[in-house]
Image: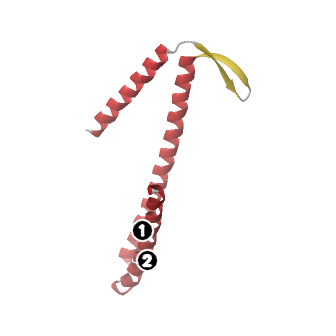
Amino acid sequence: MRKQWNLLLGLIFILIVVLLSVANVDSVAFNFLLGTAKLPLIVVIIISVLIGVILTGSFTYLKIYRQQHRIRRLERELEQVSDLQPGQADHASGEQSAAREEETRSSRRRHTRFRK
């Protein structure tokens, strides 16, 4: 169901971009670092949207990559802890709870920073 909503929202977004582009077919002067070009406004709008999609996708991919890396690291740690003998597991769980507590504190700091 979620994929259907994403598809629907994507189609609505594309429809809005197309309608804005068709309504704005005048030529405009486009200034960039190396000079100026006279382009139809539809081209400027589409290029701007594509740049936004590429940037958003890049940042999203980076975040997903970091999360997957963290998951793999935590799975390895969990496997190491489960392989410990019963007497050593108590010591390892104390280290994990300290790490978890530190992680919770840092996440609280992040959340309070955004509330201000």
The residue most toward the left is 1
The residue most toward the bottom is 87
At 29% from the left and 39% from the top, the residue drawn is 2
Position of residue 6 in the picture relative to residue 76 (left or right): left
Q: Which residue is mark 1?
A: 104
Q: In the depicted view, which residue is nearer to us: 60 or 31?
A: 31
Q: Amino acid at mark 1?
A: Thr
Quadrant location of the N terminus in the rendered image: top left
Instruction: Report how far apart the C-alphas of labels 1 and 2 lie in the structure.
Output: 10 Å
Crowd tier of the residue under label 2, counting other residues whose Cα lies within 10 Å: few below 14, some 14–19, many 20 or above: few
At 33% from the left and 84% from the top, the residue drawn is 86
Position of residue 6 in the picture relative to residue 62 (left or right): left
Return the mark for residue 98. 2
Position above or below: 87 against 104: below
Q: Amino acid at mark 2?
A: Ala
Q: Secondary structure at mark 2?
A: helix
Look at the numbered discs 1 and 2 and tell me whether their residues touch, using CB distance below 8 Å: no
Q: In the depicted view, which residue is nearer to us: 10 or 28?
A: 28
Question: Closer to the camera: disc 1 or disc 2?
Answer: 1
Q: Position of residue 73 (x, y in %)?
A: 46, 64
At 35% from the left and 31% from the top, the residue drawn is 9
Position of residue 35 in the picture relative to residue 22 (left or right): right
Q: Position of residue 50 (x, y in %)?
A: 52, 29
